[in-house]
Image (tube, grey):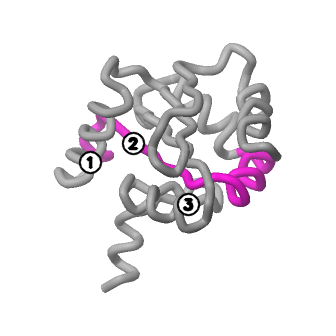
Amino acid sequence: MLSSLLFLLMTHLNGLVWLSDFPSAQAQAKQEHKQILLNFSGSDWCGPCIRLTKELFQSADFEQFASEKLILVRADFPRSKKNQLSKEQQLKNDRLAEQYNNKGSFPLTLLLDENGRIIKSWEGFPPNQAAGLLNELRELTHE
């Protein structure tokens, strides 16, 4: 039962665990003294979102860095019927969007402290490319 629940709260992307429940992620961040990376994505329709996932979030460099320094949260807003989220998950994502993404930007990536305060945000695909965003994250987390 617990393993089923944990599976529902997470998605895997190249070995990394992306949580889909923000309160759980925040509790984990507080316990592990890590920052939270929150990514708003349209995984099946947003070209820049798909590119950011492929070029940054699925890279070995990001995977190594994130596993040590970050708690990852994805708020996905797919459009395709086959990728539809549960009503419960959609409500969670909508609440996160109301709090952190009221303009509806995709992709939107935020670095948050363990209390949910925004440290830095990146709207769209970063102009300095995925490697530049990773370097900024390293600086902001004092790697």
What residue sits right under mark 3 in the picture? 17
Q: Is residue 5 left or right of residue 58?
A: left
| Secondary structure beneath label 2 | strand
Q: Residues within 10 Å of mark 3 (few under 14, many from 20)?
A: some
What residue sits right under mark 1 in the picture? 92
| C-alpha distance separating marks 1 and 2 | 8 Å
Q: Residues within 10 Å of mark 1 (few under 14, many from 20)?
A: some
Q: Position of residue 48 (x, y in %)?
A: 54, 23
Q: Position of residue 1 (x, y in %)?
A: 31, 85
- Is residue 52 positioned above or below 32 on the image? above
Q: Which residues are magenta?
A: 59-84
In front of the other: 25 or 107: 25
| Secondary structure beneath label 3 | strand
Q: Is residue 136 left or right of residue 106?
A: right
What residue sits right under mark 2 in the picture? 75
Q: Is residue 71 left or right of residue 102?
A: right
The picture quadrant where one finds residue 130 is top right
The picture quadrant where one finds residue 8 is bottom left
**Residue type, label 1:** Lys
Q: Answer with mark 3 or mark 2, whichever residue precedes in sequence.
A: 3
- Residue at 71% x, 29% y: name it: 133
| C-alpha distance separating marks 3 and 1 | 18 Å
Q: Position of residue 74 (x, y in %)?
A: 45, 46
| C-alpha distance separating marks 3 and 2 | 13 Å
The picture quadrant where one finds residue 46 is top left
